[in-house]
Image (cartoon, helix red, strand yellow):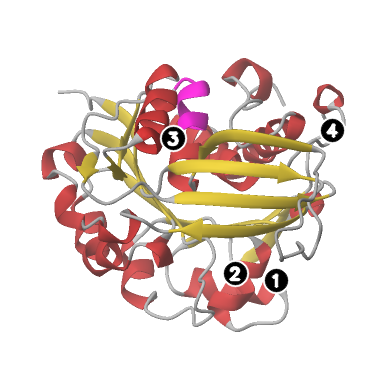
Amino acid sequence: MAPEYDLLVIGDANPDVVLSGAPRRPAYGQHEELVERGELVLGGSGAITAHGAARLGLRTAFAGRVGDDAAGRLVLGVLAEAGVDTSHCVIDERPTALTVVLTEGAGERAILTAPGCLPYLTAADVPERLVAAARHVHVASYFLQPRLAAGLPDLLRAAPGTTSLDTNDDPSGQWRGLEEVLAAVDVLLPNAAEALAITREDVLEKAAGALAARGVLPVVKDGAAGALTWQDGEAVRVLPPHLPQAGPVVDTVGAGDSFNAGFIAARLRGLDLRQSVLVAAASGTLSTRAAGGTAAQPTWDEVHLL
């Protein structure tokens, strides 16, 4: 029997309140400051990746926890509108997580998150039959979900297809506890800062090599410098494609998650490693054309002819 889903994403989902042109140090004392623009958009690395994958034509399911509140209904509604199956999400009595993103210019941002029900997601919340029904399983925001992290190695080992992980940032700054999960995952999708922090290396090529030595394929997002991966025993730099249609960068929130969606979609469609990284880079770049992580996510027709 053919798999029911191309992709199962497990992880975080929450609204993002994105304030553009925010001051670097907001003034306290009830002093009201005006910013350039505010947006209420879909947030959470897992949710943005799932939304992007659906835009790219993948049959996508999402498993996570949201509250029985307006924020949770917003998240599930936006995902469902994109064609993502959210029927396996747990509705929690605790509130949905909420993030405020303060952006300064095109790339600088501060991220403030109230976790709500997010840390209470566990591997047991994800049905075995759902994992078995997917060609690929992707997990996001490892360090924000410690209960999920505890059962993640077994969950990934049970997946019949390929797997990937984007740890995202570690708010504690410790970057511990990854040994077992890295041994169980096929692809790691960190950004450059995360790759250096995980490996304790100071050069990105060395970090990629250290990750590859653990048996995982590293695909490292490196902003305007493209991406770095590992092939035939050496680091391979893939420069970003030229995309005249991209236009000016409006907002980089969620670009890394769109990169993840592009890479997974390309691999599942049979593209080789370099082509897949190019598609991923294009997906991330094109997502910056509008505010928020999902408003400008590309379709497959926009990225696959690179």
> Mark 1 or mark 3: which comes first in sequence?
3
Camera-side residue of 119 and 55: 119
The residue indicated by pointer 3 is: 50
Q: In the image, residue 118 lies at what x, y percent?
A: 34, 55
The residue indicated by pointer 1 is: 204
> Mark 2 or mark 1: which comes first in sequence?
2
Q: Residue at x 49, y 74 (%)?
A: 213
The residue indicated by pointer 4 is: 242
Kind of residue at disc 4: His
Can you say whether 19 is above or below 28 in the image? above
Q: Gap in Å between the C-alphas at discs 2 and 1?
A: 7 Å
**Front tag of 2 and 1:** 2
Decide: few, some or many residues near mark 3? Use Cα within 10 Å; few <14, some 14-19, many ≥20: many
State the extent of the magenta-drawn residues as a range.
51-57
> Mark 1 or mark 4: which comes first in sequence?
1
Asked if disc 2 and disc 1 are in contact, CB closer than 8 Å, the reply is yes
Q: Gap in Å between the C-alphas at discs 3 and 2?
A: 22 Å
Kind of residue at disc 2: Ala
Camera-side residue of 222 and 110: 110
- 123 displayed left or right of 236: left
- 263 displayed left or right of 79: right
Asked if disc 4 and disc 2 are in contact, CB closer than 8 Å, the reply is no
Can you say whether 153 is above or below 246 in the image? below
> Mark 4 or mark 3: which comes first in sequence?
3
Asked if disc 1 and disc 3 are in contact, CB closer than 8 Å, the reply is no
**Label of residue 195 in the image:** 2
Q: Main secondary structure of the magenta part?
A: helix
